[in-house]
Amino acid sequence: MSSTAKETPLYQRPAELLQNLIRFDTTNPPGNEAQCIAYINKILQEAGFETKMLGSETERPNLIARLPGRGEAPPLLLQGHVDVVTTVNQHWQHAPFAGQNIDEYIWGRGTLDMKGGVAMMLAALLRAKAEGIDLPGDVIFTALSDEEAGGGCGAKYLVEHHADLFKNVRYALGEVGGFTSYIDGKKFYCIQVLEKQVCWLKATLRGPGGHGSIPMHGGATAKLGRLLQHLDQQRLPVHLTPVVSQMLTMMASTLSSSPTGSRMQQLLDPSQASAVLDQLGTYTHFFDPILHNTVNVTILHGGHKINVIPSEIVLEMDGRLLPGYAPDDMIRELHELVGEDIEFELIRYGKGRVEPNMGFFTTLADILHEADPLGIVVPTLMPAVTDGRFFSELGIQTYGFLPMDLYEGFDFLSALHAADERIPVAALNFGANALHEALRRNKA
């Protein structure tokens, strides 16, 4: 590192922060986030912050730091996790835990999900402290463990055992949102305001068993084939939730002169939506999950011996519910699709926020408009879950707001959890500056 770089304040070097975070292998399981959290703790303490380390396991702590404001606005929470998903059986161009800067991209597991976001938050927080900015309200920063495996040692633990630390917090900034998506050349920044919820199911298929030498028709394996074919070729019913309706309306208006704009308008009609989705090409994967409850078969159990026809097959299914819907809705829709002769049992369900608190949305949108006048800011629904679901139990509205000005062709969602995960250095700087503005503009 050059002497000039050493003299530059750390908050002006979010790329370096990210590189150092990546070099801690926090693959979850097992996580082992302690060293990574300790590195963040050292940075904050050296900058003059008082910190707390809290957790149910020594090797899986969570860090809390607070920057006081003048008390005219509620505390603002910055929450981000430092654990990452596995790289097993992935083929990377560059080592996933080396944190290399190659052609002004930082490469490595966690650059997008979400050590890059944590680096942005740290940069914004350190800058506010170093510059002595008179913030409207306190800022609470928490670096979390265990998000990628359910949050039991992380956000869930803090909410259940240390809720007092988040007293009076109204808004939080976390993953996933604020990055650019391009549609027909138009640039959109989608801020997440709600997320779908987990609805994991077990499906049991039964039929006559028998000797493997005797042909069997209509048994459990035949039912399995029909079930998988139905799920592959058909969708569950369309549901137009208010957030998605607002997003589509804004996009359709912006794209009114293009064929895609017309299709966006058709997506607002549930009777046309499924057919239109198949005409959207690469955009289908973006809109499909936010218009339906969804389910994927992920684990199959069936058969114990090659010459015995199984009489029972059990499937584990990853279901995701739209806001306002319950497990009974998912099970009813599945029965309507695949028939009544399959038993469904709920494994896990997380009830999240049904309606967003949009009180901070306009401020966040203004920040992005000012940073990039060409961008159109829209609210969106996250098709997966984040730690925001735990903080929502305390009445806290999380906005997915980790702004990244990405070039057209950079598919953020496809890069998540994939090989060659990387982020442009310029996007890190953009996000750190936007988050700094959010701290300054916190409102009552």
Image (cartoon, grey):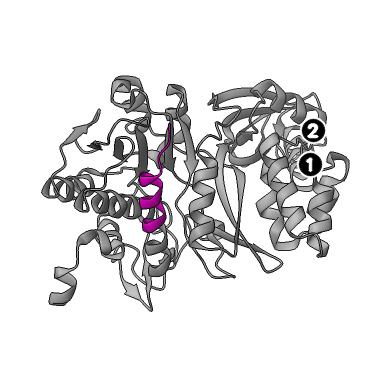
Q: Position of residue 257 (x, y in %)?
A: 82, 64
Q: Position of residue 170 (x, y in %)?
A: 43, 29
In the image, taking residue 399 as reference, residue 262 lies left or right, namely right
In the picture, residue 98 is in which quadrant?
bottom left
* Chain part drawn in magenta: 432-444
Q: Quadrant of the C terminus?
A: top left
Residue type, label 1: His
Residue type, label 2: Val
User: What is the number of the mark on residue 172?
Assistant: none
Q: Residues within 10 Å of mark 1 (few under 14, many from 20)?
A: some
**Mark 1 — residue?**
230
Could you tell me which residue is drawn at 45 percent across and 28 percent down? Answer: 396
Q: Position of residue 133 (x, y in %)?
A: 26, 47
Residue 443 included in the magenta stretch of the image: yes
Secondary structure, magenta segment, majority class: helix
Q: Quadrant of the N terminus?
A: bottom left
In the picture, residue 10 is in which quadrant?
bottom left
User: What is the number of the mark on residue 338?
Assistant: 2
In the picture, residue 324 is in which quadrant?
top right
Q: Is residue 234 above or below residue 276?
A: above
Q: Are marks 2 and 1 in contact (CB under 8 Å)?
A: yes
In the image, taking residue 343 as reference, residue 83 lies left or right, namely left
**Residue 179 in view:** no
Could you tell me which residue is drawn at 38 percent across and 28 percent down? Answer: 169
* SS class, disc 1: helix
